[in-house]
Amino acid sequence: MTLTIANLSKVYSRKQVLSNVTLELKAETIYGLLGRNGAGKSTLLNIINNRSIATAGAVELDSMRVYENETCLNRLYLMSEDTLFPSQMKIKQMFKQTAAFYDGFDENFAKKMLTAFGLDANSSLRKLSTGYRSIAKLIVALAVDCDYIFLDEPVLGLDAHHRELFYQFLLETYQQKPRTFVISTHLIDEITYLIEEVIIMNEGEVIQAASTEEILQTGVAITGPSELVEAFVVLVKVLDKETFGGTMTAYVTDADKLGAELPEQLRLTPLNLQTYFIKLTKEGGQTDEI
Ligand SMILES: Nc1ncnc2c1ncn2[C@@H]1O[C@H](COP(=O)(O)OP(=O)(O)OP(=O)(O)O)[C@@H](O)[C@H]1O
């Protein structure tokens, strides 16, 4: 099973917010969708899930056009800030309504999550705090049995304990019933261990789609005397350089192409995903004088 996004573009009142987005989302994979504020992540997720209409391009599930196609749409689920449930609705009614729309809603798992988060099924959404309202929506999203589940900033408003609990439940349901999760978030450090594939958007475009492993293996920082660093990185893609006195740190994306042995005065440090993302999506020039 594959979800194909082909040449998707979106223009809002003459502003191009998505440009030719082309992606393939595999079955049974956890993706991280990363991008700075306004990069177009929510717009992309809304179009995939038929909540917004693309200006151009198409989304297909196993070669079937998703747009206004009930069969396809029943296999996709989007949890976002927009609440589709009326505020007076009780949590148990949310479960019931979702189960009526989506086959295979796992009520036992939903109840297990309710207990773990300390929520009462009889509470109505409007009486919950912002964080608990998000938790109620998350419980529904993790209990649906759709092939593709999109979580747009799922942990917004959740405290650190609850975020951790949510990540554990996400892994639990993924292991029990593998399906695809696409998580859009700004909390990159927290989700690095969860995600198998990374999609990075910038100003309406997908600028990188690769496995987390590949990114972590090829992103490095090289520090040492400026001239030596400059000479060593001449053949590779440098995302950013920082200089301090005569010392330079160069942030490199394709460490596998460095080739030559590392000179003794240079130090090579692997980049974590968050630093890699910051350097890749940084505005402006390459060299920062500190
Ligand atoms: N309904 C709308 N009308 C006009 N412009 C919109 C609309 N929705 C989004 N935009 C614009 O589209 C661009 C992308 O917004 P989007 O919400 O997709 O970004 P995002 O990557 O999800 O950002 P964030 O991380 O801040 O949530 C922004 O410039 C935003 O102002």
Image (cartoon, rainbow, N blue to C red):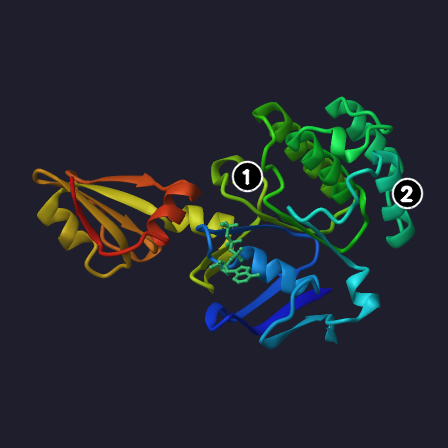
Mark 1 crowd level (few <14, some 14–19, many ≥20, 10 Å Cα): some
- Residue 151 horizontal side relative to residue 146, left or right: left
Residue denoted by label 2: 96
Residue denoted by label 1: 191
Q: Residue at x 43, y 43 (%)?
A: 273
Q: Is residue 111 above or below residue 233?
A: above
- Residue 34 horizontal side relative to residue 235, left or right: right
Amino acid found under the numbered disc labelled 2:
Lys
User: How many angstroms separate mark 1 from mark 2 (CA)?
Assistant: 30 Å
Q: Which residue, as the protein is rendered here, is positioned at the far bottom?
A: 56
Residue 144 percent coordinates (x, y): 81, 47
Q: Secondary structure at mark 2?
A: helix
Residue 228 percent coordinates (x, y): 12, 48
Among the 4 quarters of the image, the one containing residue 263: top left
User: Looking at the image, is mark 1 or mark 2 nearer the viewer?
Assistant: 2
Residue 64 percent coordinates (x, y): 75, 74
Q: Residue at x 26, y 59 (%)?
A: 236
Please state the total of marks drawn on the protein image.
2
